[in-house]
Image (spheres, rainbow, N blue to C red):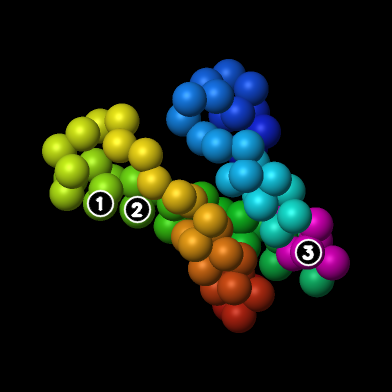
C-alpha cells in the first residue's frame, strides 16, 4: 500500500514511512492475518485523520508531516483489538 503510493507519487510520502509500513507489516503478520489486516487498516486510518487535521490547522492541502507515530499507534491498536 505505502510502496504503491511511494512509486506513484513520491512527493506524498517519504521513504522512511514506506519502510516503516513494511516493518510493521512483517511484525503484525507474525501474529496472524487478522492482526495484520486490522493493524494496517488502523495505521492507514490514523494517518488519514492526522493528515486531515494537519491540513485544517495549517490551511495547506499539501502540508507535510511525519506519519511514523500514527503508523506505530495503529499497529499497537491492531494488536490490542484483533
Question: Are the two marked residues, 2 and 1, in contact with CB atoms closer than 8 angstroms?
Answer: yes
Badge 3 element: helix
Question: Are the two marked residues, 3 and 1, in contact with CB atoms closer than 8 angstroms?
Answer: no
Could you tell me residue 30's position as x and y percent? 84, 67
Between the C-alphas of marks 2 and 1, the distance is 6 Å
Question: On residue 49, which mark appears?
Answer: 2
**49 on left or right of 45:** left
Q: Quadrant of the C terminus?
A: bottom right
**Picture residue at 48% right of the left edge, 51% below the top:** 67
Could you tell me residue 40's position as x and y percent? 61, 55
Check the image and report above or below for 43 versus 32: above
Between the C-alphas of marks 3 and 1, the distance is 28 Å
Residue farthest toward the right in the current orientation of the protein = 30
Looking at marks 3 and 2 on the same chain, the residue that comes earlier in the sequence is marked by 3
- Range drawn in magenta: 25-30
Q: Is residue 2 visible?
A: yes
Amino acid at each position: 500500500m505505502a510502496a504503491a503510493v511511494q512509486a506513484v507519487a513520491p512527493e506524498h510520502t517519504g521513504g522512511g514511512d514506506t519502510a516503516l509500513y513494511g516493518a510493521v507489516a512483517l511484525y503484525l503478520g507474525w501474529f496472524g492475518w487478522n492482526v495484520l489486516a486490522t493493524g494496517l487498516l488502523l495505521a492507514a486510518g490514523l494517518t488519514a485523520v492526522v493528515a486531515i487535521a494537519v491540513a485544517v490547522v495549517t490551511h495547506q492541502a499539501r502540508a507535510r508531516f511525519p506519519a511514523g507515530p500514527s503508523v506505530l499507534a495503529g499497529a499497537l491498536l491492531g494488536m490490542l483489538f484483533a
